[in-house]
Image: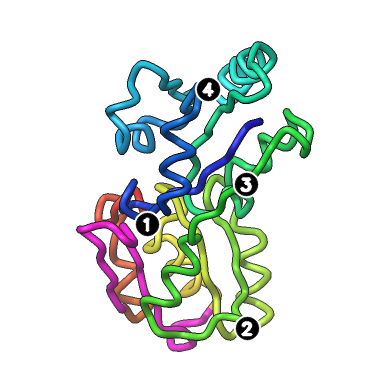
Amino acid sequence: MIHVVGIGLNGAEGLTSSTLELIAQAKILAGGDRHLGYFPQYGEKSLIIKDFSVDLNKIGQIHQTLKSHETIVVLASGDPLYFGLGRLLLEKFSPKQLKFHPHLSSIQLAFNCLKMPWQDATIISAHGRSNELLTQALQKGAKKLAILTDGQNHPGAIANLCLSLGLTTTYQAWVCENLAATNEQIQAFDLPSLASLTATDFSPSM
């Protein structure tokens, strides 16, 4: 069995005791450098995921050699099935081979930090994607938007997109960074102020 464990920026302390026990008992612990960094005590059984196609094949090969009681744990950010590693794993493995243990997503954390109901929010990922869907949502007048960003489509760039569409006073923006970590930061901006900022003004873990 491959267990896919969601984890936040607060690392191991944000996981339940049963999830920590699952990690301790795993034959292989796989994940990115940051995720594995939360569990240095398991270095001898760690597999760093850098190239998804190569490393998921490696996980598949290891999985075939496991005994019935042995497991692999794959660490992923937040909710693995929400713009996460879960989709790639489901393309590689049968659903019967996978079990998901979700953590809070960054969207959930952001809205709860802002004390803002979010059942009516439009949620868009601009992370590694074009701004086409975001532009459409803005043009349709979405009242409440949550946007996952990256180094190119950073908050300043998103604000500039809003201004280019004539939405100068339509929205107030909040930038939520490093949620649940010790250096968590949430800032409020009007769009012109936010548009003056560049990618280097923001954390890579927004």
Is the residue marked by circle 3 packed among few (<14), some (14-19), or many (20+) residues within 10 Å? some
Q: What residue type is labelled 2?
A: Asp
Q: Mark 2 or mark 1, which has the lower sequence index?
A: 2
Q: What residue type is labelled 1?
A: Met
Residue shown at the point (49%, 38%) measured from the top left? 22
* Cα distance between the residues tagged 2 and 1: 22 Å
Most extreme residue toward the front, as rendered? 69
Helix, strand or loop at mark 4: loop
Q: What residue type is labelled 4?
A: Asp
Q: Which contiguous range is marked in magenta?
A: 166-188
Circles 3 and 1, Cβ within 8 Å, touching? The answer is no
- Is residue 179 part of the magenta span, yes or no? yes
Residue tagged 4: 51
Residue 100's tag is 3
- Is residue 126 part of the magenta span, yes or no? no
Helix, strand or loop at mark 2: loop
How far across and how far down the image is residue 145, in percent? 55, 75
Residue shown at the point (73%, 28%) measured from the top left? 92
Residue tagged 1: 206
Q: Mark 2 or mark 3, which has the lower sequence index?
A: 3
Residue 178's tag is none
Q: Is 37 on the left-hand or right-hand side of 18?
A: left
